[in-house]
Image (spheres, helix red, strand yellow):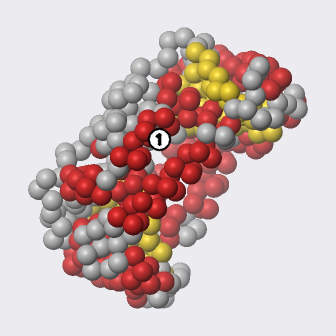
Amino acid sequence: MAHATFDIPSSQNITRTTLANGITLLVYENWSAQSVNLYGTLQAGKLYEAPDTPELASMTATMLMRGTQTHDFTALHEALESIGADLELTASVHNVVITGKALAEDLQVLLTLLSDMLRAPTFPEVWLTQLKAQLQTSINYALQDTRYMAERTFRDALYPPTHPQHSPLDRTLAYLPQVTREDLQAFHARCYGAQGMILAIVGAVKTQEAVALVERTLGDWHNPAQDAPRVAPVVTPPETTRRLFTPIAGKTQNDISMGTLGPTRRDPAYTACMLANSILGEFGMMGRVGHVIREEAGMAYYAYTRLEGGESQGTWQLNAGVAPHNVDQAITLARDEFARLTQELVDEEELADNQSYFVGRLPLRLENNNGIASVLEAMERYGLGLDYLRDYRDIIYSVTREDVRAAAQMYLNPDALIISVAGSEGA
């Protein structure tokens, strides 16, 4: 094959280009298959909506695929289906996430359609009405979902009302009927633009051709009214433990979400926290909490921990599903494991096993174009550098037992947690 690639994406084979309008483009050639993937972000997530307009960012992103000035809904989707391509835009807390896939020969078509959606949406009234009904239905389902409600209540208690992660369902239900097409148009006009946009392209395409195609389709996109980048408010972790209960009639299982604030992805302690979380509630059959609560005590349908990490403070939390009469004991066992992680050094073998697990699963994340593209975008967004993947093994194995304990002590106070339970009364 004339187009040789290195085993690991790095500064040797990733081309980074910044367009004049502010788009950062990362291109990695991969000729193992004749396809190409896009993965990108632009700064138009929940962080850019007002607290009294929940779901506005998400609805705007969804409606971009419902019609443009040159393609109505049917024409837009026929254009994608006719070449077997996929394109999707979804809103997260900070960004709108772009994912796309097509044959390499159809990259120009994919980018042209993406440009059309981003720059010239029409927000058809008929599709907005349908979307509002769909959201209403999904919320009604969520209100009966013990797992969802436990976590929703946990987040609303952990984050203040001014934070984009605080979004009570009653506020959303009150706002939905009021949303207008003009609201979406105004949000789009204010938030969508090329400044701060990151786009990764991975696949069977020459770098120069990919850069030229992005220049041609998106290079002249300018929005002088685009909002300046925003930063989420800094949140103070809880100082004492607070327990909340959400009753949901007719349920035989109660769900628990408990935890606190974790680090941002840029925090120097993030890697140590990531390994600490794996030991606590991820590795094997969900780490220590899974072993103690699920296997030894036999009381959980599932039990695991999750560390989010991101542009702002995410959560470090445990999620578990238990019978109502086992809720208190499950919480006690989980808090004991939180405390043990902060007080004792993890076993050398336990740390080594988890380090091997993280290093060993990296090739699986890079086994397809979409996985590579998403990692490249994250490397750019979090300032990890183009050689992050090349150095990944050394980064993971540089973490010591003392680092793991110090990271847990920094963030995981077992005496200052938000504990949210949803389900049957009397738990």
Residue found 56% across the figure and 30% down from its top = 153
Q: Residues within 10 Å of mark 1 (few under 14, many from 20)?
A: some
* Image-quadrant location for residue 196: bottom left
Secondary element at tag 1: helix
> Would you name the residue on which mark 1 appears?
173
Q: Is residue 352 left or right of residue 404?
A: right
Q: Residue at x 27, y 61 (%)?
A: 24
Give the x, y percent position of residue 90: 43, 58
- Which residue is nearer to you in this view: 398 or 37? 37
Q: From the viewer's perspective, tell me whether residue 267 is left or right of residue 317.
A: left
Position of residue 355 relative to residue 291, above or below, is below
Residue visible at 50% across and 17% down? 238
Position of 6 relative to 269 (above/below) = below
The quadrant holding residue 60 is bottom left
Q: Nearer the viewer, residue 152 or 277?
A: 152
Residue at 78 percent across and 42 percent down: it is 285
Screen quadrant of the C terminus: top right
Q: Position of residue 367 (x, y in %)?
A: 58, 68
Callout count: 1
213 or 274: nearer the viewer: 213
Q: Residue furthest left?
A: 224
Instruction: Tell me where residue 364 appears, x and y as whole percent.
Output: 62, 62
Whether residue 348 is visible:
no
- Left or right of 144 in this view: 382: left
Q: Residue 16, percent across and down?
A: 29, 64
